[in-house]
Amino acid sequence: MPVVTSTEMFKKAYEGKYAIGAFNVNNMEIIQGITEAAAEVRSPLILQVSAGARKYAKHIYLMKLIEAAVEDTGLPICVHLDHGDSFEICKSCIDGGFSSVMIDASSKSFEDNIALTKQVVDYAHARGVVVEAELGRLAGIEDDVNVSEADSSYTRPEDVEEFVARTGCDSLAIAIGTSHGAFKFKPGTKPQLRFDILEEIEERLPGFPIVLHGASSVIPKYVDIINENGGDLKDAIGVPEEMLREAARSAVCKINIDSDLRLAMTAGIRQTMAENPSAFDPRKYLSPARDNIRELVKNKIINVLGSDGKA
Ligand code: G3H
Ligand code: 13P
Ligand code: ZN
């Protein structure tokens, strides 16, 4: 079975009031941890690859590893470019076998965002590939995604119908107060998301799949292990799981998770190295890292996304 697009996944998720997890992948252990968890609970999956991940591992290695996971698990898996910032990178991923791309032109003007998104949609649709676009800007810093709080902005519901109609995009990422990375809310403040904006967008675009980026919960268990073993993530705060469950029941059909994977993996490595300071066989510390990812993803699917049993 080849990789699939997200079209059917989103249709069922919208109607069934659950969401598909979109997990960022960078290497074999991450891909195995995620796909083994999903296979155990029979969940469809989106595996997404950032520009930074392509630079780190090379497109072809990630593509072949994902194809191996499809063969190994028999799951419907969509392979998606995360935060493509140009026509060229989207084209390269489409030509290289991805079934879905994101064109993130959210830093551009409304008209320029429409023009670039439409260019990608035309190229992608002619080749059976689907396109996620973004309106509004999330704050947060990753390798290749870097937006200061001052430059972030909520999505304006009054823009969404025109944007979707003129671009023909297949799903839309919106900004309602989540952000990338492990430091999403100020310490001492109550995490809040603008569900009112999400509701208005849902009313304006009935049946249309919405995407939530920056949706890691920053699981305390893994943060604590990192902090106990020399890390300093004491101000790390994520999106509360109850909010993600609420989003999954709404028009949000795709929930993006990267930071939680990084924390789970790093906790496994730090803990193993602390317990066995002379360990130097990478398999000794990458196995517990992969186990943590498997456990994390299984919990997400069952307790947050509600996509178990839907594959
Ligand atoms: O939203 C961004 C993802 O977490 C990817 O991050 O560019 O560091 O690979 P990255
Ligand atoms: P987190 O940093 O919250 O995991 O968000 C990941 C993301 O949105 C990838 O596009
Ligand atoms: Zn993102």
Image: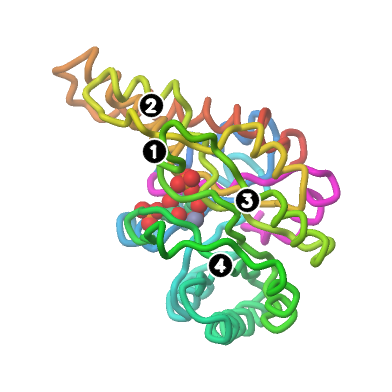
Residue stretch rendered in magenta on the structure? 1-27
Q: CA separation, marks 1 and 4?
A: 22 Å
In this rendering, the answer to whether 222 lies above or below 104 is above
In primary-sequence order, the first of circles 4 and 2 is 4
Residue 246: give x, y in percent of width and height: 72, 39
Q: CA separation, marks 4 and 3?
A: 14 Å
Q: Residue at x 40, y 41 (%)?
A: 183
> Where is mark 1, residue-wise?
262
Q: Nearer the viewer, mark 4 or mark 3?
A: 4
In this rendering, the answer to whether 139 lies above or below 247 is below
Q: Tell me, yes or no, whether the highlighted magenta stretch contains residue 14.
A: yes
Q: Nearer the viewer, mark 2 or mark 1?
A: 2
Residue 95: give x, y in percent of width and height: 51, 75
Q: Residue at x 53, y 67 (%)?
A: 97
Q: Are marks 4 and 3 in contact (CB under 8 Å)?
A: no
> Where is mark 3, residue-wise?
77
Which type of secondary structure does the marked residue at label 1 adopt? helix
98 sits left or right of 76 in the view: left
Which type of secondary structure does the marked residue at label 4 adopt? strand
Q: Which label was assigned to residue 223? A: 2
